[in-house]
């Protein structure tokens, strides 16, 4: 991004799993637990590593905070670039 004229702006790739609003907490907790378990499997670790990715398995609250930070970052970038949705 520095080369594109946007100093101090870091771009990273990330993936996450979302559920519809109002999904019961026990369902969210089960999904989280199963995803974290999958991310610990050697074959999943090696597949992600082959793509240059680390499986994180953060909590639903941590992921929500990450998504909020990403929204804020990209909103700022869009405004600084003078872009608007059409």
Image: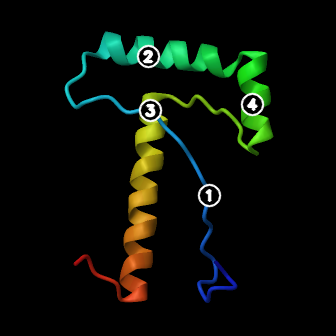
Q: According to the image, label 1 marks what residue?
A: 12
**Residue 54 placement (x, y as % from top left):** 71, 38
Say left or right for 14 vs 40: left
Question: Which secondary structure lies at badge 3?
Answer: loop
Q: Quadrant of residue 38?
A: top right
Q: Is residue 5 above or below residue 40?
A: below
Name the residue that disc number 2 marks. Answer: 31
First in sequence, mark 2 or 1: give its number.
Answer: 1
Q: Which of marks 2 and 4 is nearer the N terminus?
A: 2
Residue 17 in picture, x, y percent from top left: 44, 32
Real-space CA distance between mark 2 and mark 1, rounded to the nearest whole angstrom: 24 Å
N-term-proximal mark, 4 vs 3:
3
Eyeballing the image, is 66 above or below 72?
A: above
| Nearer to the camera, 59 or 39 | 39
Q: Residue at x 45, y 66 (%)?
A: 73
Q: Nearer the viewer, residue 58 or 1?
A: 1
In the rendered structure, are the residues bearing label 3 and label 1 in contact, judged by CB atoms less than 8 Å apart?
A: no
Please tell me whether residue 16 is drawn above or below residue 70 in the rendered image. above
For label 4, the residue is 47
Tag 1 and tag 4, C-beta contact below 8 Å: no
> Looking at the picture, how far across and down is residue 13, in whole percent?
60, 53
Which residue is rendered at x = 39% and y = 52% of the image?
A: 68
The earlier-in-sequence mark between 3 and 1 is: 1
Badge 3 is on which residue? Answer: 17
Give the residue displayed 19% in from the left and 25% down from the top: 22
In the image, residue 7 lies at what x, y percent? 63, 83
> Which color scheme did the rendering employ for the protein?
rainbow
Residue beneath the point at 66% across and 32% down: 55
Q: How far apart are marks 1 and 4 (CA)?
A: 19 Å
């Amino acid at each position: 991004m520095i080369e594109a004229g946007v100093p101090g702006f870091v771009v990273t790739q990330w993936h996450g799993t979302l559920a519809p609003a109002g999904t019961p907490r026990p369902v969210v907790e089960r999904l989280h637990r199963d995803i974290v378990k999958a991310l610990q499997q050697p074959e999943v670790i090696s597949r992600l590593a082959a793509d240059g990715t680390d499986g994180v398995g953060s909590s639903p609250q941590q992921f929500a905070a990450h998504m909020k930070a990403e929204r804020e970052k990209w909103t700022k970038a869009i405004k600084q670039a003078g872009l608007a949705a059409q």
